[in-house]
Image (spheres, helix red, strand yellow):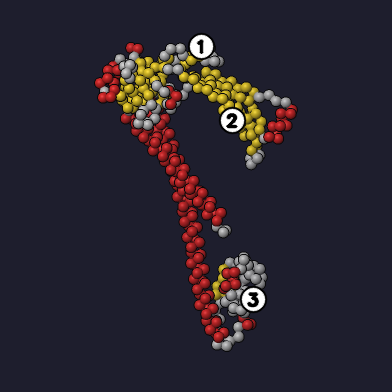
């Protein structure tokens, strides 16, 4: 029963490390596949020949390609709510609450934030190339990215009175204020799109999320920067997977070493028990032959002969069975801790 919490901790640590290692490895493999797809993806020039290339392709579809161009809205673009003259095709409005939370363990206030409100607006847009050639971008909100420009950021400081201060210290939460931000993908920004390129029934080239499940990218960085960023992320996940795997191996080795020590101790106890049983059988034979063992009787059970020496105190006062039945390894005579026990041989 004493080993139950330790064994439970071993199982929890081992299970957590295995689960995390498997998860990180899965993400790493997924990132590796994305990097391989990016390395194999052709970078197509955005010009008037693109529609002819798609028309000559079987199925009028290229599964994974790279297109670079500038953002051009179809119709009326989105206008910034806070900065006059800023127009874009994707707009993200976020309101975050910042506050201090009392940490009873560290005995200090720690920063915390949560999103109170978030809204994303988008309008249809194209990627514009040379000679007015363009590609229509489909489902931009399903893509990874893009990193949009922050056009507005304002922090509204919280104000409170004396009663608010008292309630804050009682509740353990102290509001700092609210941060209001607006991000936009502006018209005219350079954009790299990586996805499936098709020639639709209206004979317009369009790029959309790949139907084979590959990752769809819209990035304000150039393609080389995007590729290197994905390789870096894959390397990070690989390192995390290796660390968790090593942690699992360390826990497994520690548990195995502990189990081996327990098994070795059981073997020693079993050998000692057999040795004491053999010695006790000889003493019982002497008792049957008429020898009086009452003077040498165990001080605990008063029936079996004394058969073991308790060390380090050296007292000979009990039989091996009574020694095993002791609730704690303490000598019944002098109350010292028993470090080990050896059989007593009487000539």
* Picture residue at 41% right of the left edge, 23% below the top: 139
Q: Is residue 274 above or below residue 233?
A: below
Q: How many discs appear?
A: 3
Instruction: Pinpoint residue 291: horizontal percent, then vertical percent.
Output: 58, 87
Which residue, as the protein is rendered here, is positioned at the far bottom? 290
Residue 85: mark: 1
328 to the left or right of 189: right
- Mark closer to the chain start, 1 or 2: 1
Residue 113: mark: 2
Given contact means CB atoms under 8 Å apart, are the residues at marks 3 and 1 in contact?
A: no
* Picture residue at 25% right of the left edge, 21% below the top: 56
Q: In this view, does 309 lie above or below 96?
A: below
* Picture residue at 60% right of the left edge, 22% below the top: 155
Q: Quadrant of residue 101?
A: top right
Given contact means CB atoms under 8 Å apart, are the residues at marks 1 and 2 in contact?
A: no
Instruction: Pinpoint residue 91: horizontal percent, then vertical percent.
Output: 49, 19
Q: What secondary structure is found at the residue carrying circle 2?
A: strand
- Mark closer to the chain start, 3 or 1: 1
Residue 299: mark: 3
Other residues around mark 3 within 10 Å, as few (<14) / some (14–19) / many (≥20) = some
Q: Quadrant of residue 223?
A: top left
- Mark closer to the chain start, 2 or 3: 2
Q: What secondary structure is found at the residue carrying circle 1?
A: loop
**Mark-to-mark CA distance, 3 and 1:** 100 Å
Given contact means CB atoms under 8 Å apart, are the residues at marks 2 and 3 in contact?
A: no
Q: In which quarter of the image is residue 165?
A: top right
Q: What secondary structure is found at the residue carrying circle 3?
A: loop
Instruction: Pinpoint residue 284: horizontal percent, then vertical percent.
Output: 55, 82
Other residues around mark 2 within 10 Å, as few (<14) / some (14–19) / many (≥20) = some
């Amino acid at each position: 029963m004493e080993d139950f919490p330790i064994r439970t901790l071993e199982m929890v640590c081992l299970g957590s490390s295995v689960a995390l290692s498997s998860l990180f490895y899965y993400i790493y493999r997924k990132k590796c596949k994305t990097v391989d797809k990016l390395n194999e993806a052709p970078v197509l020039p955005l010009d008037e020949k693109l529609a002819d290339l798609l028309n000559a392709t079987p199925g009028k579809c290229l599964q994974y390609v790279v297109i670079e161009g500038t953002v051009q809205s179809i119709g009326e673009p989105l206008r910034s709510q806070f900065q006059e003259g800023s127009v874009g095709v994707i707009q993200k409005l976020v309101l975050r609450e910042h506050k201090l939370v009392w940490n009873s363990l560290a005995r200090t206030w720690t920063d915390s934030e949560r999103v109170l409100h978030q809204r994303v607006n988008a309008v249809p847009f194209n990627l514009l190339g040379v000679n007015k050639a363009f590609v229509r971008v489909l489902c931009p909100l399903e893509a990874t990215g893009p990193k949009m420009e922050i056009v507005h950021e304002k922090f509204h400081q919280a104000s409170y009175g004396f009663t608010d201060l008292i309630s804050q210290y009682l509740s353990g939460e102290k509001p700092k204020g609210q941060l209001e931000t607006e991000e936009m993908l502006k018209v005219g920004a350079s954009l790299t799109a990586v996805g499936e390129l098709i020639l639709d029934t209206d004979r317009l080239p369009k790029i959309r999320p790949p139907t084979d499940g590959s990752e769809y990218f819209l990035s304000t960085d150039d393609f080389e920067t995007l590729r290197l960023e994905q390789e870096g992320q894959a390397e990070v996940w690989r390192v995390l997977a290796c660390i968790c795997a090593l942690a699992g191996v360390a826990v497994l080795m520690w548990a195995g070493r502990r189990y081996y020590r327990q098994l070795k101790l059981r073997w020693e106890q079993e050998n000692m028990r057999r040795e004491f049983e053999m010695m006790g059988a000889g003493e019982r034979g002497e008792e049957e032959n008429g020898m009086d063992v009452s003077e040498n009787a165990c001080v605990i059970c008063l029936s079996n002969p004394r058969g073991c020496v308790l060390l380090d105190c050296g007292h000979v006062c009990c039989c091996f069975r009574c020694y095993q039945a002791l609730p704690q390894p303490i000598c019944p005579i002098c109350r010292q801790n028993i470090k080990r026990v050896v059989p007593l041989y009487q000539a």
